[in-house]
Amino acid sequence: MISNFKGKVAVLTGAGSGFGLECAKIGAQLGMKLVLVDVQKDALDAAQAQMQTLGAEVMARLVDVSNEGQMQALANDVQQTFGAPNFVFNNAGVGAGGLVWENTVADWEWLLGVNLWGVVHGVRLFTPMMIEAANKDPNFQGHIVNTASMAGLLTPPNMGIYNVTKHAVVALTETLYQDLKLVSDQISASVLCPYFVPTGISQSHRNRPSQLKADQPTKSQLIGQAMSDKAVGSGKVSASDVAKMVFDAISQDHFYIYSHPKALGNVQHRMEAIVQGHNPPDPFKERPDIGDKLKADLRN
């Protein structure tokens, strides 16, 4: 249970927009020291200026979270400037859709690099610092929040790469939680599983690296992009709402963080099918109109 955030150090990846930016705002208001990390310079500069206006002590770093060397340099800078962070928000993420066999190797490398390796690097580099700090100081408290998705608990069609990366983040974070409990009572972890929330993720291609340039999009990818834009754009739960949920979860040491708990009915159907050995359930059972349209669009 963590109640005092003042003066604590937080590392936030994907801090230029969405959940990362909103969590940074709350951190600034609580008097935290912030390490803002993003790959988009203009967004990072704006976030840094905003947090400083709110009175926060800020370190901003332009980092590709998929890059081991850049993440190691970030970890070194944090250690030298602030010491071990109390909080790490492995939040940076990108999205892409399409039928799973139509995605290129470049598509796979991009999403796996940001969504999975970005979290791996964050866990691998910052957790040992936090454990060392906890071993030296009985009052040290730490928490790691990894951003997954409801797509990490479900398998919606036409977005296979994204599902794979987010399932991996859920598994990684559940294991991290269990591993931490073996070695420390002072550090914990949570996994954030948002559903459709208006953030910048549906426009992730704006930050796609040139060396992983996308091919001409396939029909399924164009359909997936349109569906994602519509679903995310119409979301009624805001990134600010979710950021508040994240800090509540940290305060109460809750592991699973859901933006839309009603979506857990679909998770239950999936888990029951797994336990009972049934075929995967219809993901559009509650909204057959969406499934029928997707099927018709792909077949026509």
Image: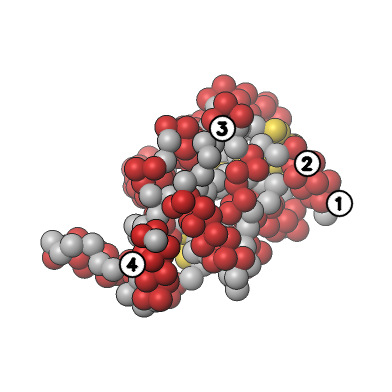
- Which numbered mark, 3 or 1, is in the foreground of this view? 3
Query: Cβ–Cβ below 8 Å for labels 4 and 1?
Result: no
**SS category of the residue bearing label 3:** loop
Give the amino acid at mark 2.
Asp
Specify the quadrant of the image occupied by residue 233.
Answer: bottom right
Q: Earlier in the sequence, mark 3 or mark 1?
A: 1
Distance Cα–Cα, label 1 vs label 2: 17 Å
User: What residue does disc 1 label?
Assistant: 53
Q: Please identify the residue farthest to the right as the structure is shown.
A: 53
Q: Which mark is residue 3?
A: none
Q: Is residue 43 above or below residue 19?
A: above
**How would you rate the neighbour count of disc 4 (Cα within 10 Å): few for under 14, some for 14-19, many for 20 or more?**
some
Marks 1/2 in contact by CB < 8 Å: the verdict is no
Frontmost residue, 79 versus 217: 217
Q: Is residue 71 left or right of residue 173?
A: right
Tag nearer the camera, 3 or 2? 3
Q: Nearer the viewer, mark 1 or mark 2?
A: 2
C-alpha distance separating marks 3 and 2: 21 Å
Kindly identify the amino acid type of the residue bearing the numbered disc 3. Answer: Lys
Q: CA distance from mark 2 to mark 4?
A: 38 Å
Residue at label 4? 283
